[in-house]
Image: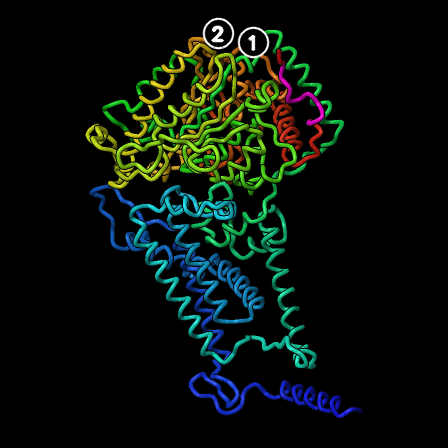
Amino acid sequence: MSEAHHKKTVRRNSAMREMEKPVFTGPAHHGIRSNRYQKPQLNWFVYIIISISLIFCSTLFAQWGVLAKPEYPTGAQIDPETMFNDSLRGQLLHFVTQMWTDHDFKFLLNFMVLSLIFIVLLLIINRFWICVAIFSSVIIVYAIANHFKVQLRNEPIIPADLNFISGGNTKQIVSFIPPNGISIAIGGVCGLVAIILFCILLQCTDGRKGLIRCSWRKPALMAKSNLKRIVTRFISLIVIAGFLFSFVYSLGNKNSWGQQLADGIADDPQIWNSIGDARSNGAPMAFLRLVHTNTMDKPHGYNKTTMLALSEKYQSEASRINRQRSTNLTDNTVIMILSESYSDPTRVPGISFNQDPMPNIRDIKSQTTSGLMLSPGYGGGTANIEYQALTGLSLANYDSSLSVPYQQLVPKQKWAPSFNQIWNAKRPADGSFALHTYYRNMYSRADDYRKFKFSKFWAMDGKYKLTDINPIDSSWYASDTSTYNAIVDKLGQYHDDSKQFVQVATMQNHSPYDNWYNDNEFKDADTSTGITDDERKNIETYAKGVSYTDSATADFLNKLDQMDRPITVIFYGDHLPGIYETAEKNPSNALALHETDYFIWSNAASASSHEKASQSNYTSSNYFMAQASEHMNAKVSPYLAFLTDMHAAVPAMSVPAASGNANEDNVYLDDNGKKMDIHKLPQSTRTLLEDYRFIQYDISVGKNYLRDTNFMDVPLK
């Protein structure tokens, strides 16, 4: 053996012996152990106490984010005990103490889930104080974001909202911070910075650099004790992370082991009532159950033969309908306007004014196809109603864990048919365009509109950027007048003989409603009863916004009347604003809080001017294009023929939340707005509903058998 090799062997053996030495020597003093080789190290018991305290506080803070302060009517006499129980502190205290008072362990379930997440993070990073800093930061941001979203839209953060950040929408999201939330945001940032700096300081002074002491340097890497620690760390990580992943992945699926385990402890899911789910079952659990979603169950008997038979069936139905129709959809420009949060506030129980906030639209509705639309959302969910209108697909057919198709489904689809593509078939270059007076990446619209094959998407940013867009007084969002002017401007860029499909989403009446408008006559006109002062302020501001929309819409239609080309407008409110707290407390008001206004109107150059289609009192947004086809006496595709028959049988349909009870069946309404009992429907209607599920499954997650048929094709000249 050479001398050099001998020296190398001695050094390696010395290093291995050094690794085998005990980590700690000497006595312990006040939870600190030390030796001459290392900085002071905390006792393991201290780490455990800190971890438990951190997760306990994190569970409470996450829950705080979805709670709301109680609002009482002016002059109401509330006893001190009730006031405390309804306060944020009282609600948080009940969330913890119900383990002993009610044997309800929801707090413990959320604590356990956050503990597993913390342990997995700790095993990955292997640096205790860095892990504490990261975990605390995430919880603080999550809780404060929840607090703001609940204030604005009465719904918590869901996994799909993370697409806003990944899509570069951080700046836009920050703009949603309400004025009274600035101090909370600043406090959160300061607290976040303080925690991070404190953890960095402790990481630098704590001698225990790795919670599980592992060395990755040779020759210590191959030491037996070091290998044992590495293997222990990774086995622990795989086992715990695997359990957590499997639990979360299965949590949103009915009858899965994860759901059964959670239910056995305390969980009581309220899928369609997201805010109720978060407040009752805990914010972390409500969030995690939506991480993995099941789009919809495969219908029994789904196969190519079944779908080809359905295509032929509705081809025959389309031929029957088209024998009675004289025009084509593409003979008209169709403008589909989603009016943000638009609805008649006086239909809400307890809300009234001695001045009508929407006289013009009320008059328009009386002269054309119009009625009420059953919305799946209240206070939010704009993209869902828009999705239904553009595709004809209904959220009622999807699994309850699919909360936002725009973000959870459309980006993954290989085939995404939408009604604007009917115009694209005749004018591939410019058959359809979209316009939204806000930022293009909200709800992943930019990506989804490309998937839907819109030729252009005009928004407040990006390549096709809108100009001359202004708010009203001190409001935050673009006025409807600005939006309508932009539509007229874009239509003016085309020849009079060109026809397009135009998708529009407004922003004027988006929350919050913080006394934006000068000279608001609805403050004096308000005769509402039994509501809180905060409600009254919000409702009065909202009513003024509705009034502005009313006059702007009338002016817009007058301008369209002057154009020498047939134009049809589908106008609808997507959902009610989440400002009716008193009415919302009464479950019997659920339907009223899910009904918005809509109309289908044609200008003077159109043969369908002043037409009023049959059975239009109630609808849901998935039927709009079928109704517009009837209104314009236009020929239909097999798909539109199916939707026409479906609307005749079930005029309106929505998710269980529209009934006020997430555990009930889907909501089906007749043309008088009365609930239809699905168990008492005639066989022909049940067959239509079954066909709907086959069609929707094939388009959404199935084999797309209908794609190679003429199911979506309409007659073209």
Query: Upstream in the sequence, badge 1 or badge 2?
Result: 1
> How far apart are the alpha carbons under marks 1 and 2?
9 Å
Q: Is residue 401 magenta?
A: no
Residue 32, percent from left and from top = 46, 84
Residue 436, percent from left and from top = 44, 31
The image quadrant of residue 530 is top left
The image quadrant of residue 200 is bottom left
Q: Inspect the image, locate mark 2, and give the three-letter code of the amino acid beneath it.
A: Ala
Q: Main secondary structure of the magenta part?
A: loop
Could you tell me which residue is drawn at 35 percent across and 27 percent down? 482
Q: Quick check: 688 above or below 533?
A: above
Which span is picked out in magenta? 707-715
Q: Inspect the image, locate mark 1, and give the three-letter code of the amino acid beneath it.
A: Thr
* Mark 1 and mark 2 residues within 8 Å of each other at the beta carbon: yes
Residue under label 1: 327
Q: Quick check: 148 above or below 641?
A: below
Q: Is residue 711 magenta?
A: yes
Could you tell me which residue is drawn at 47 percent across and 71 percent down? 129
Residue under label 2: 607
Residue 58, percent from left and from top = 43, 61
Q: Quick check: 145 above or below 435?
A: below
Categorize mark 2 by other alpha carbons within 10 Å: few (<14), some (14-19), many (20+): some
Of residues 117 and 587, the one drawn nearer to the viewer in this rendering: 117
Helix, strand or loop at mark 1: loop
Quadrant of the frame with the N terminus: bottom right
